[in-house]
Structures are given as C-alpha cells and as structure tokens.
Amino acid sequence: MFSISRYFKKFDWLLFAAIILLFLIGLLTIYSINENADFFKKQLIWGGIGIAMFFLTGFIDYRIFKDHSIMVIFLYIIIVVLLILLLAVNFKIRGAASWFRIINFNFQPAEFAKLILVFLLAKYFSIRHIEMYKIKHIIISGIYVGIPGFLIFIQPDLGMATVLFILWFGIIMITGIKPYHFGIILGSGAIAAIMGWFLILKDYQKARILFYLRPDIDPLGHGYNLIQSLVSIGSAGFWGKGLGRGSQALLGFLPEAHTDFIFASFIEEWGGLGMIFLILLLSFILYRMIRIFLFSSNNFARLCVTGICLIIFSQVVINIGMNVGFFPITGLTFPFLSYGGSSLLASFITMGFLESIRIHS
C-alpha cells in the first residue's frame, strides 16, 4: 500500500528545487522587463497551479498508463479532437491558430500532446522492442505522431511540430533501428520538408528560415527580431546590465522579450555569468533525469524518461538556438523560463510524472 510518508521519502527534492529555481529565474526576468505587472501576475498564478499539479502527478502511479492501454488511447483521441477543433475555431494569435481563448487565459493543446505522445510511444515500443527490426512498427508509430504533428504543423506551429518529430525520432533510435530504415526516414523527411515548403508554410515562416542566416539583408523587417536578440546578448558583457536595466527588452526594442526571447532578456541583465549559471542548472536537471532513468524498473518507465528528456531539452536547445541565430525563429518557448500558462503547466505536469516514475519504481 502506497503511503504519504513513502511519497515524500522517495521524492526527488533536488530535482524539484532545480525546477523551482528555473521557474523563479523566469518569473524574475518577466517582472523586470515589463512595466505592466499583468504578465508577472498571470505567470505567478499558473506557476502556483503548476506546482500543485507537479505534486499531484507525482503521487499518481505512472503504471496506470503502462498497464491500461485504453487510458493512453483515450487521452490521444481527446488531444487529436482538440487539435481539429482548434482549426475549426481558427482563433489566431500572431498568425497561428494554436490556442483556445477561455475568459482571460489562452489554452494551447499542443503543449499537452507532447506528454501524451510520450506515454503512447513508450507503451508501443516497450511491448514490441524485440520486433523493432520490422519497419511496420516504425511506420505505425510514425502515424501516431504524424496525425497530431500534422495538425500542429498546419496551425501553423513549426517549432512544436519539430519537437514532436525529435521525440519520435529519438525514441526509435533508442529502441533500435536498421541502417536502411534510417535512410528511408531521412528520405521521407526530405520529401515532407519540400512539400511543406511549397504547400503549407506561410510566407512569414519562409522568410524566417531564409533570413535567419543573413538578418542584415532585411534589418527592419524579417531580420529585426534576431538582430535585436543578438544586440541584447552581445551588449550584456560578462556581468550583465543588472536586474531591470536591460534596455533592449525594457524599452521595447526586443520583441516578445517575455516569451520567445526570454533567454536574450535574461542574458542582457545577467550577462555571461548568468548564462554559465543557467547552463549549470540545466545540466543538473539533466543529471537528475538520467539518475531516474538508470533506476527505472521497466522499459516503459525508461522510455518515458527518455521521451521527457527529449521534449524538455529539445525545446531548450531550439529556443536558445533561435535567440543566438543558430536556428530559424519558430516561436518555441523555453520550458519554465518563458511566459505562458499552457507551457508552464504542461512542463510542471511532465516533470511531475518523472517524479512518479522515481517514486513508484
């Protein structure tokens, strides 16, 4: 019989403390760069709800998804239906139909699709890992991911669709794949990319991809966001400008300073020293996740931990990459750091299930 005392005894308090510290850094940055405190207040409310959900999901036995396929399929169907409804409602923010508007809050189903797909892929491959030489399992799992991935892609949300692809590709690489199957996937991906470029991507998305290597070609248009991000980071120096003194973000030169470019906003205030601290903090979180992976008691749990690592750190890498010009700007948030209720809540729930795996293993 599982008890409250055992729950708190096996709880990974170091992981929790690192996540809370990352959240507080984001909260402090949002507060310092916005004269209007509305963003800070909403983020604080969502953070409180997220922390409560973190403990709640940690208490739930993750094996309910391992032992009952119907639960996973039910959640998968719900998220697909919500993504279809999004396109029907067609409520757009910054050109993307990615949110439902509920009173004064926006709800983004794609954020929760990531965790559901982690469960689905972990369940699928944990019972078929000895048959991974059969290409049909790669195709079937690809269809599972492809349906919500396509619905997210045409919203259009290229960044989130990329994360789902990384999740699927990373898990099939972990479970084992033949070289020629790998070649088939790469070829199919190239064909899909070409079709997406000509048939699906909007003009502004194409411009983001074309101008991210040479933002100076159109410094006041498509290259503006990246240039301002690079100015914010480059002007910070090692010590930074100080809390509340990030001129690029505070004076409005850096667009979306509290969401897409929260990393640049943070570095402008805290400089190279802050970047080193942030990297160390993220490395510690990854270390605690790896420990949970190593002590997991079954393949389902190990694949879940792998999937959670992939979605959290792919978002981190893509967000930092687009802030420094390595990747096109996709609008992907930085987990726990960026402003956004759906992103923050989904991130806390995701890490809560990581605690569940640790506690119930």
Image (cartoon, rainbow, N blue to C red):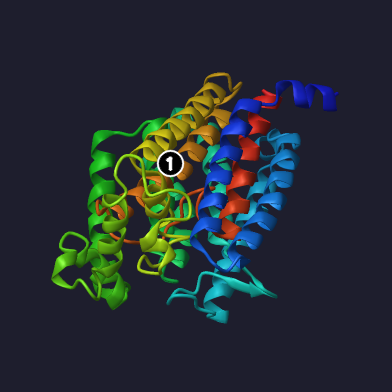
x and y percentages locating residue 256 in the rendered image: 43, 65
The residue wearing badge 1 is 313
Q: Quadrant of the N terminus?
A: top right
Q: Nearer the viewer, residue 312 or 18?
A: 18
Can residue 251 be seen? yes
Helix, strand or loop status at disc 1: helix
x and y percentages locating residue 11 in the rendered image: 70, 26
Residue drawn at x 44%, y 52% is 164
How many numbered discs, if any?
Answer: 1
Q: Quadrant of residue 350?
A: top right
Residue drawn at x 56%, y 24% is 292
x and y percentages locating residue 179 in the rendered image: 24, 35
Q: Is residue 265 above or below residue 82?
A: above
Q: Which amino acid lies under the numbered mark 1 shown in the image of this protein?
A: Phe
Q: Is residue 214 left or right of residue 263?
A: left
Residue drawn at x 58%, y 43% is 119
Q: Is residue 240 above or below residue 339?
A: above
Q: Nearer the viewer, residue 132 or 165?
A: 165
Q: Quadrant of residue 126?
A: top right
Q: Quadrant of the C terminus?
A: top right
